[in-house]
Each structure stands twice: as C-alpha cells, then as structure tokens.
Amino acid sequence: MVSVMAEEDVFKALADPTRRRILDELAERGGQTLFEICTRLVTKHGLGLSRQAVSQHLAVLESAGLVHARRQGRYKFHDLDTGPLEHITARWLTPDRPESTP
Amino acid sequence: MVSVMAEEDVFKALADPTRRRILDELAERGGQTLFEICTRLVTKHGLGLSRQAVSQHLAVLESAGLVHARRQGRYKFHDLDTGPLEHITARWLTPDRPESTP
DNA sequence: ACCATAGGCAAGTGACTGCTTGCCTATCAA
DNA sequence: TTGATAGGCAAGCAGTCACTTGCCTATGGT
C-alpha cells in the first residue's frame, strides 16, 4: 500500500516537464534502458541534457513509484507504473471528503 | 482554452503540500476568503505560515486555473475549480479512456 | 588479459521557490 | 473623518532543484 508520504513524491516527480516526457516515452515503449531514453529525449524532443541528468530523473521517478527498474546483465530496463497516478486527483474530484476528523 | 502551457502551471501548483491543503480546504468549503483559509490552515492543520504566504499560494493556484476568485466589496472569495485536474493524468493512464465522457 | 559499453556516486554551481518583512491601497463602520 | 479590516506589492533571504563535471564499478565481447 502506497503511504500518504509517497504522494508527496509523486507530485514532486510530476512537477518537472522533463520527467513527464520520460513518462511519455515509457508509456509509448516500455523496457527502455537509460541510454535509449536519453537518446530519444534528445532526438525526438530536442532536449539538450546529459546522461546523468536523465539518470537522476529516473531515480526520482523510481522513488515516487512511477517507474520500476529491473536489472539484467549490464542493462537496466525501466517500466512505467501508472498505479500512483490513479488516486491522486480523486482527492479533489470526488464529492465525498477524503479525510475526516477522528 | 486550456493550453498545453497551462498544464505546466497545474503540475507546479500541485507540487507544494501547502497548496494541496488549500485545495482540500476549498473542496470542503467553497467561497472562503484569504483570512478564513489562513486561519483554518493554522488551526486545523497546525501549519505555521503567514497571511502573505497563503496569498502567494492562492496566486499560484489561480494562475494555474485551479482556483477562481471573485471580489465583493472588501472581501475576495475563492472557489475551487477541478477542471484542470481531470485530464492531466489521463495522458498516461489512458490507452483509450477511463473517465470523462463529454 | 584488454577494452568498450552501461550505469552509479558525489561534489559543485546557477537558478528557482517558499516565506518573511515592511509598507501601501481599498472598503466598511463609528 | 477616523480607525479597523481585508488584501496587495516588492525586496530580501534561505533552502531546494536540475544539471554538470569528474571519477568510479560492473558486465560483456574480442
């Protein structure tokens, strides 16, 4: 179960446009490596960023639970997890109140 | 009407926990003034922030389209607008569509 | 063994952000 | 008018963030 604290990480992870682009990429094609993502961001979107920048973004997305990585040999494949995205807006969209005083 | 640029503002507005609390407050009771929101944040949530801090947060929420304000005499009432929240996650969630059918 | 590939760690930097402080304007009541 | 209330504007400060730079480990091919 994703705790309430993780929600903070999800919102912060989504705050950066480059990270949202990375999510776009992984939504379009799962199981990409760091270099693949980096290459695609540069070529397709014309973003000028280094490998380390993407690596750090992936770390943020991973700690937010939005991306899961599996190591295989010297490759590390990344996959999108849309789970944390499902309830974050429901907090305001639903007519009923989420938190009640005990 | 809501351009792609506005989406950036929405995500940035949601990135701050205090602003999310403000949205909670306005979801629970619409048409609150700056002082009401400020008082409630301090008393209910125990947040220690000044009036100006809340004012600036409201400005961010307003420019993101999440809050609309109407002036009436010397009061300014704020209302929540969940419109911008509806499609921001659909970008990754929908292979086709889960919600809003217009 | 060698070396190229795929990725990680950590310090440093410039920009942005949240918040404060101080002063100002506008509206209402006496 | 005077005073109190509701809110706004702008400069300044400290913390955070995104990104770079440089060096390191690990795996696979030859």
Image (cartoon, coloured by chain):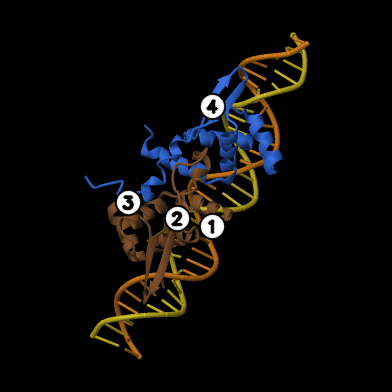
Chain colours: A blue, B brown, C yellow, D orange
Q: Are marks 4 and 3 in contact (CB under 8 Å)?
A: no
Q: Do the residues labelled 3 and 1 touch (CB within 8 Å)?
A: no
- Rounded to the nearest angstrom, the CA distance separating label 1 from label 4 is 34 Å
Look at mark 2 in the image and give the residue it sits on: B83
Q: Which of marks 4 and 3 is in front?
A: 3
Dot 4: chain letter:
A
Look at mark 3 in the image and give the residue it sits on: A95
Q: Nearer the viewer, mark 4 or mark 2?
A: 2
Look at mark 4 in the image and give the residue it sits on: A69
- Rounded to the nearest angstrom, the CA distance separating label 4 from label 2 is 33 Å
Q: Give amino acid for label 4.
A: Ala
Which is more toward the observer, B48 or A41? A41
Q: Quadrant of residue A20?
A: top right
- Counting from the top left corner in percent of width and height, residue B69 is at 41, 66
Q: Is residue B1 left or right of residue C23?
A: right
Look at mark 1 in the image and give the residue it sits on: B2
Q: Give amino acid for label 1.
A: Val
User: The N terminus of chain A lies in which quarter of the figure?
Assistant: top left
Query: Dot 2: few (<14), some (14–19), or many (≥20) neighbours within 10 Å?
Result: few
Query: Dot 3: few (<14), some (14–19), or many (≥20) neighbours within 10 Å?
Result: few
Q: Are marks 1 and 2 in contact (CB under 8 Å)?
A: yes
- Counting from the top left corner in percent of width and height, residue B63 is at 50, 61
Residue A47 shows up from this direction: no
Secondary structure at numbered mark 3 = loop
Secondary structure at numbered mark 4 = strand
